[in-house]
Amino acid sequence: MPTQTFQLIGQIGSGGSLSVARLRFRYGGGYEQSVLVGHSSGDESVSLVFNALSDRTAQNLVDAEDSVTRTPLEYAIAFFTRRMVDGAAFNVTTTRGDTLLVYLDEETISYDYISKSVFKGGLRFRQART
């Protein structure tokens, strides 16, 4: 199966972080050694916030995995559920416009009602290094 791409783009409130891991060995007397562990370019985490996921049919999109037409909220839930089951890495577009290969970083998708047909939600991803 080809690598899937998450079709929704984050909105205001989205962001990310870049972290580098380092082991430190403190020997006392001000003497210290350290070594970089993990990928030399660091690991990126991405948080995408969706301020207006609608259940209105005008914003429907076709799910590339099963060709079913879904509202943005239904799509996000279906995509999340599939990735929790198969654990596969997938592509996501960050708010900087970069495409990253990522995994889901949480076991929960949450959303809040803003009005009758509009929801706010978010997902968190961590970069997959191959």
Image (tube, grey):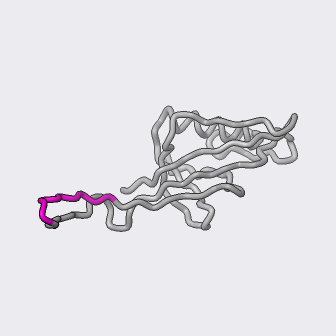
Residue 123 on image: x %, y %: 60, 45
State the residue lying farthest toward the front. Answer: 29
Residue at (50, 59) in percent of width and height: 17
User: Which of 43/60 is in front?
Assistant: 43
Residue 37 on image: x %, y %: 26, 59
User: Which of 46/71 is in front?
Assistant: 46
Task: Report the side of 37 relative to 89 (left or right).
Answer: left
**Up-down relation of residue 109 to residue 125 (above or below):** above
Residue 113 on image: x %, y %: 78, 35
**Up-down relation of residue 23 to residue 113 (above or below):** below
**Up-down relation of residue 45 to residue 35 (above or below):** above
User: Which of 9/15 is in front?
Assistant: 15
Q: Quadrant of residue 30?
A: bottom left
Residue 60 on image: x %, y %: 80, 45
Residue at (36, 61) in percent of width and height: 20
The residue stretch that appears in magenta: 21-29
Specify the principal SS of the magenta part.
strand
| Magenta-colored stretch includes residue 27 | yes
Task: Report the side of 80 relative to 60 (left or right).
Answer: left
Q: Quadrant of residue 79?
A: top right
| Magenta-colored stretch includes residue 37 | no
Give the total number of marks visible in the rendering.
0
Residue at (26, 63) in percent of width and height: 36
Task: Report the side of 50 relative to 95 (left or right).
Answer: right
Residue at (36, 56) in percent of width and height: 130
Q: Quadrant of residue 91?
A: bottom right
User: Which of 93/121 is in front?
Assistant: 121
